[in-house]
Amino acid sequence: MDKNKTKKLAKAIATGFYTGYSPFAPGTVGTLIVGIPLFLLLAKVPVSIYGVVCIVLFGIGCKVSDFLEKDSGQDDPSEVVIDEIVGYLISTIGLSVGVVGVVVSFFAFRGFDIVKPWPIRDVEKQLQKGLGIMTDDVIAGLYANILTRLFLDLFFH
């Protein structure tokens, strides 16, 4: 693949197929337009495969977000939303498909990603480049997964 096509593909992936260019809340838009449909597509596969997909997307996300950070000259550019997409997928690992679970995991993930409770903010500052961009959202996704499970267990089981 030539350099120009590679750059376009990296940009498409990093920006959640260009949803990251939304003028309003690009992370939220990327999660809604790409993250939720991707979860719905993967929800019926075994958890082990779902986990492998998350790991692969994390690795790809590290590479493409690092590339876009260098290309733009900005630290953690707002148009990079692959981190939010992967973080949302992690927030839904092992959850069954249902409107309540999708909605609760979405709001829980976005809340943790925006507020960045300990150690999310520290991790974001300590890790650099693509790894830092991706890892804080993975932790937010883990927190959201736990909160979503607690919420569903308390109110719907």
Image (spheres, grey):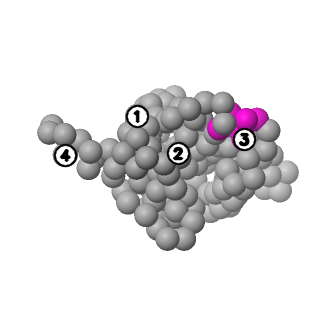
Question: Does the CB distance between marks 4 and 1 fall below 8 Å?
Answer: no
Q: Residue furthest bottom?
A: 24
Most foreground residue, 104 or 132: 132
Q: Nearer the viewer, mark 4 or mark 1?
A: 4
The residue that disc 4 covers is 4
> CA separation, marks 3 and 1?
21 Å
Q: Nearer the viewer, mark 2 or mark 4?
A: 2
For mark 1, give the secondary structure.
helix
The residue that disc 3 covers is 121
Q: Is residue 108 magenta?
A: no
Secondary structure predominantly adopted by residues drawn in magenta: helix
- Of the two numbered discs 2 and 1 on the same chain, state the one appearing first in sequence: 1
- Quick one: label 4, few (<14), some, or many (20+) residues within 10 Å? few
Placement of 59 over or under 23, stated as above or below: above
Q: Nearer the viewer, mark 2 or mark 1?
A: 2
For mark 3, give the secondary structure.
helix
The residue that disc 2 covers is 75
Residue 64 in sight: no
The residue that disc 1 covers is 63
- Of the two numbered discs 4 and 1 on the same chain, state the one appearing first in sequence: 4
For mark 4, give the secondary structure.
helix
Q: Residue at x 44, y 31 (%)?
A: 59
Range drawn in magenta: 119-124
Q: Residue at x 41, y 53 (%)?
A: 15
Q: Is residue 46 left or right of residue 101?
A: left
- Of the two numbered discs 2 and 3 on the same chain, state the one appearing first in sequence: 2
Q: Is residue 69 left or right of residue 92?
A: left
> CA separation, marks 2 and 3?
15 Å
Rendered location of residue 32, percent (x, y): 52, 62
